Image (spheres, grey):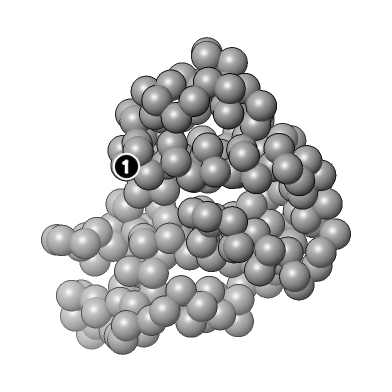
Amino acid sequence: MRVFGKSRENPFILLVSIILSQNTSDSNAIRALENLEKLGLTEPTSIVNAGLEKVLQAVQVSGLGKIKAERIMKLSEFLLERRDFLEKICEKGEKARDELMQLRGIGPKTADVFLLIYCGIPTFPVDRHINRVTERIVGKKMSYDETSAFWKEKVPPEKYREAHLKLIFVGRKYCRPANPRCEFCPFNKSCSSSKITIR
């Protein structure tokens, strides 16, 4: 999650960063964010004034460029109508997640990452790496909410962000989609899918 960096202090840039990080590497998302910054596209007004094509040119390096550009544009248009939405979202408590997910392109992971990093609300975001690790540990298919609940039961709230990052690391480095490196995985003794023979 290096892509978020200083954006943690700015709710709009943080949300844009999370959108850019979807289905791509941190390095590609960072490049896309830097492109937006170089063009001065760092707040809703400048993005709407620039237009979709210019936003697309900036973010296409992150992959799924058209989809992400459209999401950032729709988000910007919405925030121009409700300028205090992100500043007040943290005050919504349990309703904050539902309100964020009403925005186009904001799913449970994007909402949870935003709430955890910006609002400090104890949520457990789940990406494809975390879901894969968890399904292999448990030995069955799991939904987003099931995976999130699984780790909430095992990790104290103050450790959610740390555990989230470490699980992503495990998924990327060891519990890979193909040819998992079970011999090095920290979960190999408790994972139902481990190829390691326990003696």
Residue 148 to residue 96: above or below: below
Seen in the image, is 196 located left or right of residue 14? Answer: left
Residue 141 falls left or right of residue 86: left
Three-letter amino acid code at the position of disc 1: Leu
Residue found 35% across the figure and 38% down from its top = 66
Left or right: where 46 falls relative to 19: right
Residue at 43% over, 21% down = 54
Measured from the top left, where is residue 163 in percent x and y? 55, 61
Q: Nearer the viewer, residue 134 or 110?
A: 110
Answer whether residue 30 is visible to the viewer in this image. yes
Residue 142 placed where, x, y %? 38, 81
Position in image of residue 45 (x %, y %): 66, 27
**Is 105 situated above or below 36?**
below
- Which residue was labeled with disc 1? 64
From this viewpoint, is residue 186 visible?
no
Residue at (53% x, 65% y) in the render: 108
Dot 1 lies on which element? Answer: loop
Q: Nearer the viewer, residue 128 or 156?
A: 128
Question: Residue 141 at x, y = what percent?
Answer: 32, 83
Against 5, is 21 above or below?
Answer: below
- Say whether residue 73 is left or right of residue 11: left
Q: Nearer the viewer, residue 192 or 95?
A: 95
The local crowd at label 1, few if under 14, some if 14 to 19, many if 20 or more residues have their Cα within 10 Å, is some
Above or below, 154 relative to 63: below
Quadrant of res 182: bottom left
Given residues 124 and 77, the one toward you in this image is 77
Extreme-left residue of the structure: 179
The C terminus is located in which quarter? bottom left
Tell me how many marks there are: 1
Identified at 73% across, 43% down, the residue is 81
